[in-house]
Image (tube, grey):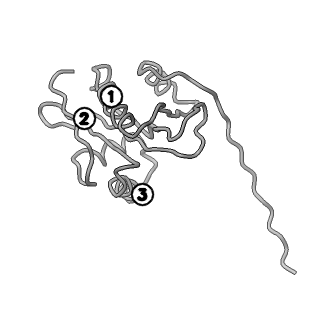
Amino acid sequence: MTHLRLERCREVEVPGWLELRKALWPETARERHRFAMQAQVDDPERHVAFVAYAADGAALGFAEASLRFDHVNGTTSSPVAFLEGIFVRDPDRRRGVARELLDAVLAWAARRGCRELASDVELANTVGQRVHRALGFEETERVVYFKRRVPRLEQP
């Protein structure tokens, strides 16, 4: 896409960032989005976010990543850069916006000494899986999570 501008989010009020996050994660309350955004801004060595803008200033998409030092499924190094989220608005998809965002994340990860970039996608999100493959990711494993309630112990 020509005339694409990327901006690193160094403050919460970056135009379009909150709205793009809400589009990707609509079930998350606005206050929780703002809390997560502030945490990223407050720790720029461990977190990064970029917003992509068109020439007219319209926010097209965003990507967020973090450094993970614990085990990341499918990886062999540490720290691992982890793509926490990537989203491009429907009308702007298939125009190279996600690729530009990912390239910015990869450069950030390389500057921090990472050798691997990992990500995850829910099993039902087949569009997200196709996007990841198109961006050069390879699938490493599939997981189904389980939980069970722990019974309360009777107090003597």
Q: Secondary structure at mark 3?
A: helix
Does the residue at mark 3 contact the one at mark 2 (Cβ under 8 Å)? no
Q: Which residue is mark 1?
A: 103
Per the model, the C-alpha gap separating discs 3 and 2 is 22 Å
In this view, the residue in front, 63 or 33, is 63
Residue at x-position 55% and y-position 35%: 77
- The residue lying at 37 percent from left, 55 percent from top is 43
Furthest-left residue in this view: 56
Labels 3, 2: front one: 2
Residue ID at (26%, 51%): 10
The residue that disc 3 covers is: 32
- Residue 13: percent from the left, percent from the top? 24, 54
Percent x, y of residue 4: 19, 28
Nearer the observer, 127 or 82:
82
Q: Is residue 66 left or right of residue 120?
A: left
Label 1, label 3: how far apart the Cα atoms are: 27 Å
What amino acid type should be assigned to the residue bearing mark 1?
Asp
For the C terminus, give its image quadrant: bottom right
Amino acid type at mark 2: Ala
Q: Residue furthest bottom?
A: 156
